[in-house]
Amino acid sequence: MVRMSRFLVILAVVYLLFSSLAWAERTDGGYYTLVDENGQIITMTARHLDPGDAYIAADNKRYEVVSIEGDEVLVRYTETVQLPEIDLDAFRTQVGQGTPGNGAVVGIYHTHNAESYVPTSGTESRDDGNGDILQVGKALADEMEKLGFKVIWSDNSHLPHDGQAYNRSRRTAMDMLQENPVTLIDVHRDATPPEVYETNIEGEPATKVRIVVGRQNQNREANLEYAKRLKAVADQEFPGIIEGIFDAKGNYNQDLGPRMILLEFGAHTNYMEHAQQAAEFFAKVIPAAVGVQPGQAQQTEQQMNQSAGRSVYWVLGIAAAVVVGYLIINKQGLSSITGFFKKEAGLGNTGDYDNDQEKS
């Protein structure tokens, strides 16, 4: 049993190491420009993209990535997405005289806690990990507490800012899951020219918000639906605040639950204060998008627990596929690696494995 457990852990680690490569953002100061077949610029982002990734723009037009050449990403229009219909008046009636949060728990954390805003602090990243982005997350947390949520806000450091940062922040997310949150929010900023995110909401300068969903996990459909609900509410409450929704390659720890979301508040070229203003506005979007009502916290707890359980099997299954694929492609050393797995799982003659190792 001990060997089998160790074997499963090895598979999970292998998967996470391979999949983390898809989670990286550009760190060379550049960004990608998404252009359609007619040469029209759709948006810009520093997020690495792959063919098959999709983007739902502010006007709800969905574009799919076709190819990438240098800094230009060619996309093609596929459809206009119908967002969920959310009756905000009915929601407010259900809330009545109470607070929208109804005491439900929300978790907020920062995978890239060093991210900063150049116009405010003079740097795009803080070496000590105490980036401006923490203040944006705190603004979101403070406003949500005013709305009646119980907010768990973490300023844990997950440095360095590399492909493994999401593996480190996963521990933070899993700790938060112990509090049975209705949603977990990973707060980031992008890296584009300032005009991509500059906006004005209710007479106040603010940044736009980009929603990111990872398409490589078993909760992808649920989290994408949640993203659409967030946009549907935001479009009614604060038109123009949503830059768009990426349905992109990666996991972003969203396999842990059905309402795990990544939000980008502006870019490094915007002011932190404008991103904080956007966070205060966006906090008012979340209650109706989550649909918090009396008694729903218990239901959400069950959903989160079920998703966390499924994620273990999902990760192990993908990890096994990765290992098999690796072995097929790399035939050299196949017998010794296979022998190693047999030994760890207690499935074969360990002496044969030792002999193979001595011969190699």
Image: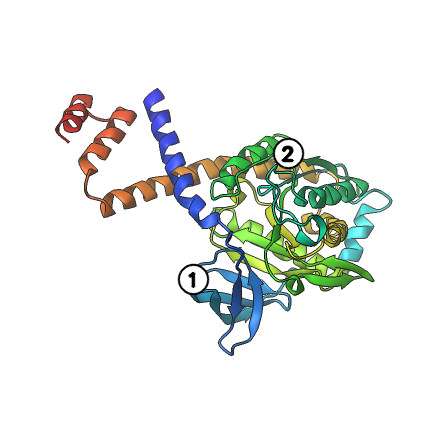
Label 2 vs 1, first from the N-terminus: 1
Residue 78 point in image, percent of width and height: 50, 70
Residue 1 visible in the picture: no
Q: Residue placed at 64% from the left, 64% from the top?
A: 196
Looking at the image, which is closer to me, 27 or 349? Answer: 27
Does residue 58 lie above or below 297 as drawn?
A: below
Under circle 1, the secondary element is loop
Give the crowd class for mark 2: few <14, some 14-19, many >=20 residues within 10 Å.
many
Task: Identify residue type, mark 1.
Answer: Pro
Marks 2 and 1 sit apart, C-alpha to C-alpha, by 35 Å
Q: What numbered label is drawn on residue 180? A: 2
The residue identified by callout 1 is 51
Residue 209 visible in the picture: yes
Q: Residue placed at 58% from the left, 38% from the top?
A: 304
Q: What numbered label is drawn on residue 124? A: none
In the image: residue 84, left or right of residue 45: right
Q: Quadrant of residue 354?
A: top left
Say which quadrant the C terminus sits in.
Answer: top left
